[in-house]
């Protein structure tokens, strides 16, 4: 039995956050390992730029719809009942991707995989928020999300190219699917459910109505801002490798080196930007993130075939772009959530961002590349970042240290009795 205790349960906090971090890293690996494998897949299955954009977009669309529809499921049935089946299924579906013999099969496997990842994503963010002490919530949610670009966009190109030297692209998908099954077992025995705090559960206030999610303006602004941030993230992640080889005429080794900057920059950004928002506020860091990402991306577009400079500029762009993803889907989303609907609020914001930024935007970018030239897709990403800066101007500040007159909903004493493990005292 999990009991309310005077000190914060730091041991559980770090165990839970570590497993959820690895789990979300595997989401990134299984999702983005396809990027550096696309040249081999395209040659085998005869895909063009628009087909490639469609494969990336199909998963994003399915992820977004699933996050919208299933985002609040774990608020009702429990975190483990969503987390464990989801990670098992998306790991298996990643392996099934290697069995695809046509574009149709590839689209089907990736779309179903998107459904399972869309269910995992908001649930894992809610579980991390519940395990984290409020004073370091932004940092720990950022740490969890930083594994997504590290595994998926920094390690994946290295893993893919090394494995391709000894096996086919089909077996690469099978091999990278295996770690998820191990993490699923560990999550099953580690994650605690919010409703198991029996001493305080009897006094827990009634859960808010679903319609209350939309009463906080940060939910609406989070949806719009995330669409903009994810347009930048996913257009770059999907098509920068082809831009480097087809437009700048760099070789595969140079492309792999430069593309890894997306993952390493995203890693530092996804814990750095939310962590700084604990100190300086969510709104300020959102504005800085959009403007910083846009400035670096502009100079990346203007840069010629210089691998070192391209790496540095792409690294800078993705520090801000991926940091925005973690900031908006983490503390901005969870602090705008009404009582008992944390996963639902996160799912609505994530789902909307995924449907457009992760689904529609790659389709649009693929069409732009196919009909006008791949170099123009980067201007599409740049426009998304600049528009996001405009939306961020209207965010309401919710960081506990920055909004003392309007205390974050997650930090109110009555809220803690409903789901927080331990107390805020250290």
Image (tube, rainbow, N blue to C red):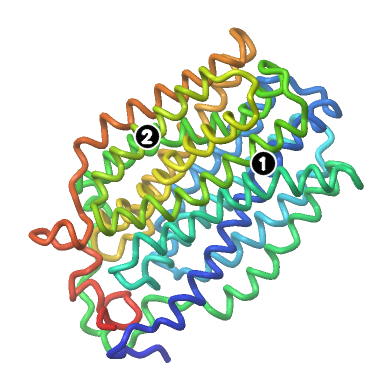
How far from the left and from the top, in percent, is residue 134?
A: 29, 69
Say if 205 sits above or below 156 in the image: below
How far from the left and from the top, in percent, is residue 22?
A: 59, 63
In the figure, is residue 266 to the left or right of 30? left
- Disc 1 versus disc 2: distance between alpha carbons? 32 Å
Say if 357 sits above or below 129 in the image: above
Which of 320 and 67 lies nearest the eye of the viewer? 320
Residue found farthest to the right: 166
Question: Which quarter of the rendered picture does the C terminus lie within?
Answer: bottom left
* Residue name at image x 35 percent, y 80 percent: 421
Mark nearer the N terminus (1 vs 2)? 1
Question: Which quarter of the rendered picture does the N terminus lie within?
Answer: bottom left
Secondary element at image label 1: helix
How far from the left and from the top, in percent, is residue 115?
A: 57, 48
The numbered mark at residue 410 is none
* Residue name at image x 34 percent, y 84 percent: 197
Q: For residue 238, what is the image quadrant?
A: top right
How far from the left and from the top, in percent, is residue 163?
A: 84, 48
Q: Are marks 1 and 2 in contact (CB under 8 Å)?
A: no
Query: Is residue 92 in view?
Result: yes
Residue tagged 2: 292
The mark closer to the camera, 1 or 2, is 2
In the figure, is residue 278 to the left or right of 394? right
Residue found farthest to the top: 372
In the figure, is residue 69 to the left or right of 113? left
Secondary element at image label 2: helix
* Residue name at image x 80 percent, y 42 percent: 161
Residue tagged 1: 110
* Residue name at image x 46 percent, y 43 percent: 319
């Amino acid at each position: 039995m999990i009991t309310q205790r005077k000190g914060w349960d730091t041991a559980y906090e770090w165990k839970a956050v570590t497993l959820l971090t690895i789990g979300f890293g595997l989401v990134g690996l299984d999702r983005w390992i396809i990027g550096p494998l696309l040249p081999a897949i395209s040659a085998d299955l005869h895909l063009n730029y628009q087909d490639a954009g469609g494969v990336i977009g199909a998963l994003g669309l399915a992820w977004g719809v699933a996050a919208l529809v299933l985002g609040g499921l774990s608020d009702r049935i429990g975190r483990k009942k969503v987390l464990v089946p989801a990670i098992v299924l998306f790991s298996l579906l990643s392996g099934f991707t290697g069995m695809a013999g046509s574009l149709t099969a590839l689209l089907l496997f990736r779309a179903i995989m998107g459904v399972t990842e869309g269910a995992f994503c908001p649930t894992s963010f809610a579980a991390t928020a519940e395990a984290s002490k409020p004073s370091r919530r932004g940092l720990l949610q950022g740490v969890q999300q930083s594994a997504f670009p590290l595994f998926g966009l920094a390690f994946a190109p290295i893993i893919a190219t090394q494995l391709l030297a000894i096996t086919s692209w089909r077996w690469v998908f099978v091999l990278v699917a295996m770690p998820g099954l191990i993490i699923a077992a560990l999550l099953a025995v580690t994650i605690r459910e919010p409703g198991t705090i029996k001493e305080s559960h009897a006094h827990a206030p009634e859960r808010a109505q679903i319609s209350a999610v939309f009463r906080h303006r940060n939910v609406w602004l989070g949806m719009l801002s995330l669409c903009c941030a994810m347009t930048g993230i996913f257009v770059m992640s999907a098509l920068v490798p082809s831009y480097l080889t087809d437009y700048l005429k760099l070789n595969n080794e140079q492309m792999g080196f430069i593309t890894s900057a997306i993952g390493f920059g995203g890693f530092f950004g996804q814990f750095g930007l939310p962590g700084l928002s604990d100190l300086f506020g969510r709104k300020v860091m959102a504005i800085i993130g959009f403007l910083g990402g846009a400035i670096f991306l502009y100079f990346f577009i203007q840069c010629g075939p210089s691998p070192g400079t391209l790496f540095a500029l792409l690294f800078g762009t993705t520090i801000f772009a991926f940091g925005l993803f973690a900031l908006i889907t983490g503390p901005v989303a969870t602090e705008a959530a009404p009582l008992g609907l944390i996963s639902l609020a996160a799912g609505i914001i994530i789902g909307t961002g995924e449907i457009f930024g992760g689904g529609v935007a790659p389709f649009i970018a693929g069409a732009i590349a196919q009909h006008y030239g791949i170099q123009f897709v980067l201007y599409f990403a740049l426009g998304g970042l600049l528009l996001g800066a405009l939306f961020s101007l209207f965010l309401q500040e919710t960081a506990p240290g920055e909004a003392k007159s309007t205390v974050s909903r997650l930090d109110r004493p009555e809220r803690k009795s409903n789901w927080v493990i331990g107390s805020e005292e250290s």
